[in-house]
Structure formats: C-alpha cells, structure tokens
Amino acid sequence: MLQSVLATDDRGASPYDVATVCLHLAAATHDGDTVAVADLEHGLAQLPADRLIPTLPPSARRLLQTILAASDPLSTSQLVDEAGVSQRSYDRHRELLTAIGFLD
C-alpha cells in the first residue's frame, strides 16, 4: 500500500514519507501487534496531499487525503465539501479513485 500511494513512476517511495507514516502508526491506537489497513490509512492521512500519489492531479490528491483522514464513510457531498473540490473534479476522478481502491 505504501509503495502504491507514495511512489512516482520514476522512483520509489520517499524514505521521509515512509518514516512519517510509521511515526504516526506508532502513535495510533490499535490493539495487537499487526498493522491493519486502517492504521496505514491513518498514517498516510497525516502527509500533505501533494505527497500522496504524486502523479495524480492536485484535486484527486485532495480527495484521497480527505478519504484517508475520514473516520467514517463520507457521502459524495461531504467528500467534495471537505476536500474543497468541485463536483466536476470529483466526477472526473471518481473512476480512478475507485480503481485504486479508495472509493466504493
């Protein structure tokens, strides 16, 4: 998951970004010794939007960051409002965010 969200086409994930995510994982409250997807999502949500899938357009990265930061599922209107993007931007990026597993 970290590789797919943090890497670009020409390089792997930034060690700084991976360390930042891991620091937030350590601070996250979870039970057990395993790291769940929700823990990774929490850690990733702490990064600035421009560090998440750097090849995505800025509005798609803002949508992704908002999805990762949400503690509960968001309606489309909530997602658009909280991400600060237009409905048209959401419509343009919905298929891609669904394909990479961040929207249902």
Image: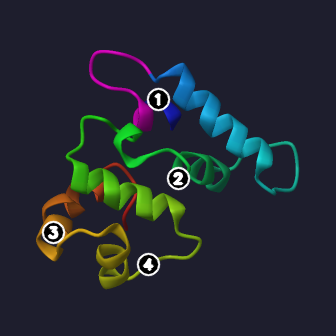
Query: Which callout, 2 or 1, points at the residue further toward the start of the chain?
Result: 1
- Helix, strand or loop at mark 2: helix
Quarter of the image where the C terminus is located: bottom left
Amino acid found under the numbered disc labelled 1: Gln
- Residue at x-position 53% and y-position 31%: 17
Pointer 3: what residue?
A: 91
Pointer 4: what residue?
A: 74
Q: Measured from the top left, where is residue 51 in percent x and y?
A: 40, 38
Amino acid found under the numbered disc labelled 4: Leu
Q: Quadrant of residue 62?
A: bottom left
- Residue at x-position 49% and y-position 58%: 68
Query: Which callout, 3 or 2, points at the residue further toward the start of the chain?
Result: 2
What span is in magenta? 4-12
Query: Which callout, 3 or 1, points at the residue further toward the start of the chain?
Result: 1
Amino acid found under the numbered disc labelled 3: Asp
In the rendered image, the vertical position of residue 95 relative to residue 83, given as above or below: above
- Residue at x-position 42% and y-position 63%: 66
- Helix, strand or loop at mark 4: loop
Badge 1 crowding class, 10 Å Cα cut-off, few under 14, some 14 to 19, many 20 or more, is few
- Helix, strand or loop at mark 3: helix
Q: CA distance from mark 3 to mark 4?
A: 15 Å
Mark drawn on residue 3:
1
Q: CA distance from mark 3 to mark 2?
A: 22 Å
Pointer 2: what residue?
A: 45
In the rendered image, the vertical position of residue 97 relative to residue 56, given as above or below: below
Q: Measured from the top left, where is residue 61 in percent x and y?
A: 31, 51
Q: CA distance from mark 4 to mark 2?
A: 15 Å
